[in-house]
Amino acid sequence: MIVPIELAQTQSITYNITIDELPDLTFDTKVVVVTNPTVAGFHLDTLLQKISARELHVITIPDGEKYKTLETVENILNECFEYKLDRKSLLIAFGGGVIGDMTGFTASLYQRGIDFIQIPTTLLSQVDASVGGKTGVNNKYGKNLIGAFYQPKAVYIDPKFLETLPSREFAAGVAEIVKMAVMFDKAFFTFLQISDLSDEAVLRVAIRKSVELKAWVVNQDEKEAGIRAVLNYGHTFGHVVENETNYTTYLHGEAVAIGMVMANALAVELGLLTEEEAQSIKTLLKKSSLPAEYVIHDIDDFYEHFFLDKKSANNTIKFILPQGIGNYKMISDIDESIVKKVLRQFGEF
């Protein structure tokens, strides 16, 4: 199955997201695969058998969110220079969201921009991170604060790569699927409530639907000037959770799940979401083995971290909240006292 990306404001940029067995790939140029030891151990041989290129190299970087830094990107760049890549060369991101973000960012920088493709191997990257061209790294101030919008030339989603995915990583991807359903499609949310994603056929349906929804959003708004910001539901809170825990306690999807629960509490406080709807979302997250509780130790400090979020502007915070299930509302003028009242629900007692 192919889902097209056709950017409405950048008509010269189009590419396909292919959801199927990974095809044979032939390139008349130098190709560098960027991966990590975990993915390489399971799947690198399979990938290399699929690729034909003028030269083929592999760069292996450490595994984990804590390595998503400018230093790692510089290390990738240095190896690219050692291999004497030129502007017609190609990078392949082979891994999860961290690999995809850093490979895409490296591609945007090398000689002012070379091509790259995404071959995501985690559920989170297949349904979210690999689609749409967001690239970047973290720093001490927050997540993905350094980066670029830089579109791949293609995305190849092969669900077979998920067979070796640890259950916790799988659940982290489900969080992004739930996010899409809550924001855009109530019928999809109902489907997830009654479905077992461990069934391969059901999982393929969920992947396809999530990718279609994300493509629909990205096609309208490549650089997050409008509707694409809705994809950050759960992220405004979740990024603070990740930052507070030094990106070591929670996987990204786990933090997003916690962030959705917090966003839902704010939506309930504002009358956008009923208690029953908030509970149904929380129940689905728990059914998917995702965390739904978090203790905030310093309410004021947690609140101040919101202002480092990329969506904040003019000293205001943009919150993405569900308006019922299947719809959304973006609000930038919520009084500080209301937000802190909600945060205190997650404080120490």
Image: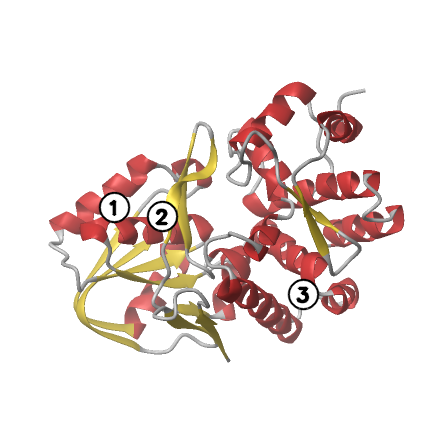
Tell me the crowding category of disc 1: few under 14, some 14 to 19, or many 20 or more residues within 10 angstroms, Cα based: many
Residue 25 in view in this figure: yes
Checking the image for residue 76, the label placed there is: 1
* Residue 322 x/y as whole percent: 74, 51
Quote the CA–CA distance across marks 3 and 1.
35 Å
According to the image, label 3 marks what residue? 197
Type of residue at label 2?
Met
Numbered disc in front, either 3 or 1 = 1
Quick one: 284 or 198, which is closer to the camera?
Answer: 284
Q: Quadrant of the C terminus?
A: top right
Tell me the crowding category of disc 2: few under 14, some 14 to 19, or many 20 or more residues within 10 angstroms, Cα based: many
According to the image, label 2 marks what residue? 102
- Element class at badge 1: helix
* Residue 262 x/y as whole percent: 72, 38
Identify the mark nearer the N-term, 2 or 1.
1
- Element class at badge 2: helix
Asked whether the residues under the numbered discs 3 and 2 touch, taking CB atoms below 8 Å apart as contact, a structural biologist would say no
Identify the mark nearer the N-term, 3 or 2.
2
Q: Residue at x 68, y 36 (%)?
A: 333
Residue 167 in view in this figure: no
Asked whether the residues under the numbered discs 2 and 1 touch, taking CB atoms below 8 Å apart as contact, a structural biologist would say yes
Residue 225, above or below 309: below
